[in-house]
Image (cartoon, rainbow, N blue to C red):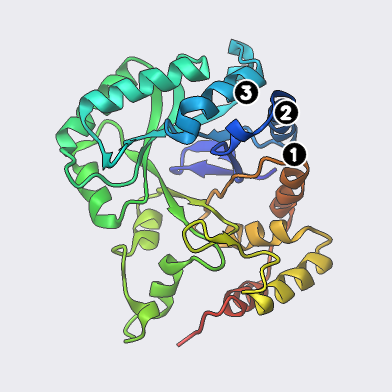
């Protein structure tokens, strides 16, 4: 497993395991998945307080058999801010959410805390105060956001001087790559050229903020997996061609496409299968050529101006 530096400073595996579906696994299968991840060098685990209503964090700690020595081998990330029918970035909610996650995860700290979805009622001073308290108390080492645009991150960063934002988790895959479409279609009047996120890809690169793609195998908003789907025949034909060339699974090609981008993104893969995780991690050994990268992009139905 190759490494990248999150925020330019924190060494981490270039592929992370998302734990959103962990509550659907039996205890033995959860144990197998976590052990396989560690054996593969995928020791970065992504959580959120809402995954399984908190159950995913509990099951993770139980299945891992969390101990201080094991904890030191892991990088654990969790997210907060989503409540029923609202988003909540208040100081009180952030602090309470972290305490609850720490209890469920059986640990004294998490390595990364992300704000989950933007809260339009956010008071950035409150967020900054909560982050400072969490860092000073040793409960959170580093901070970031999820699904925020450049302007929202700039506003928050103005106040979070002591706790800089190192991560932005965004939906990104071969079929859902608007952050790339807009950059390729600058000065065009087509729909692909509409800048919907304030140039978040370039903003993150300029500020050494690591993008963590979520749902790297999905099309739409959890509408389905594009691999093997008859909705994307040309894409799957090209993926399968490259899978054969590199002696890898189609999933590895999908992740290799993300890893090929010079932004040095860290995809979050949410598989619950130890075998599939092993197949996916082959991506770390694959470097697609420039031509192959663009061929995959175009085969997903994209166009170059």
279 relative to 92 in the view: left or right: right
**Res 164 → quadrant:** top left
Q: Which residue is mark 1?
A: 274
Q: Residue at x 26, y 20 (%)?
A: 133
| Cβ atoms at labels 1 and 3 below 8 Å apart | no
Q: Is residue 139 visible?
A: no
| 3D distance between C-alphas at marks 2 and 1 | 9 Å
Disc number at residue 35? 2
Whether residue 25 sits left or right of residue 141 in the image: it is: right
* Secondary element type, mark 2: helix
Q: Position of residue 270 (x, y in %)?
A: 60, 44
Q: Is residue 81 left or right of residue 121?
A: right
Q: Nearer the viewer, mark 1 or mark 3?
A: 1
Q: Percent from the top left, x then y, of residue 247? A: 84, 61
| Residue at 26% in and 41% down | 86
Q: Are marks 2 and 1 in contact (CB under 8 Å)?
A: yes
Relative vertical location of residue 303 with respect to residue 264 in this rendering, above or below: below
**Residue 73: assigned label:** 3
Disc nearer the start of the sequence (1/3):
3
Q: Give neighbour class at mark 2: few <14, some 14-19, many 20+ (Cα, 10 Å).
A: some
Return the disc, 2 or 1, that comes first in the chain's sequence: 2
SS of the residue under disc 3? loop
- State the separation of the CA atoms marked 2 and 3: 12 Å
How would you rate the neighbour count of disc 3 (Cα within 10 Å): few for under 14, some for 14-19, many for 20 or more?
Answer: few
Do labels 2 and 3 touch, CB within 8 Å? no
């Amino acid at each position: 497993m190759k490494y990248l530096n999150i925020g330019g400073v924190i060494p981490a595996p270039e592929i992370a395991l998302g734990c959103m579906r962990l509550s659907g696994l039996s205890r033995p299968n959860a144990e197998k998945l976590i052990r396989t991840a560690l054996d593969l060098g995928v020791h970065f685990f992504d959580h959120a307080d809402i995954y399984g209503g908190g159950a995913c964090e509990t099951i993770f700690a139980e299945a891992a058999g969390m101990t201080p020595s094991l904890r030191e081998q892991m990088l654990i990330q969790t997210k907060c801010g989503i409540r029923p029918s609202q988003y909540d970035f208040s100081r009180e909610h952030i602090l309470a959410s972290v305490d609850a996650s720490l209890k469920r995860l059986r640990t004294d700290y998490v390595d990364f805390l992300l704000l989950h979805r933007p809260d339009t009622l956010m008071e950035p001073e409150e967020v900054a105060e909560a982050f400072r308290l969490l860092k000073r108390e040793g409960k959170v080492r580093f901070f970031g956001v999820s699904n925020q645009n450049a302007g929202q991150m700039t506003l928050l960063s103005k106040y979070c001087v002591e706790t800089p934002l190192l991560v932005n988790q965004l939906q990104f895959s071969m079929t859902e790559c608007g952050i790339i479409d807009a950059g390729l279609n600058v000065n065009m009047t087509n729909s692909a050229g509409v800048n919907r996120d304030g140039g978040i890809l370039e903003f993150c690169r300029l500020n050494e903020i690591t993008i963590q793609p979520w749902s790297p195998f999905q099309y739409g908003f959890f509408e389905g997996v594009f691999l093997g789907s008859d909705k994307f025949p040309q894409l799957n034909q090209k993926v399968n061609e490259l899978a054969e060339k590199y002696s890898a699974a189609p999933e590895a090609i999908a992740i290799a496409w993300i890893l090929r981008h010079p932004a040095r993104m860290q995809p979050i893969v949410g598989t619950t299968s130890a075998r599939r995780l092993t197949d996916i991690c082959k991506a770390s050994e694959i470097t697609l050529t420039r031509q192959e990268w663009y061929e995959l992009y175009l085969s997903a139905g994209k166009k170059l101006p």
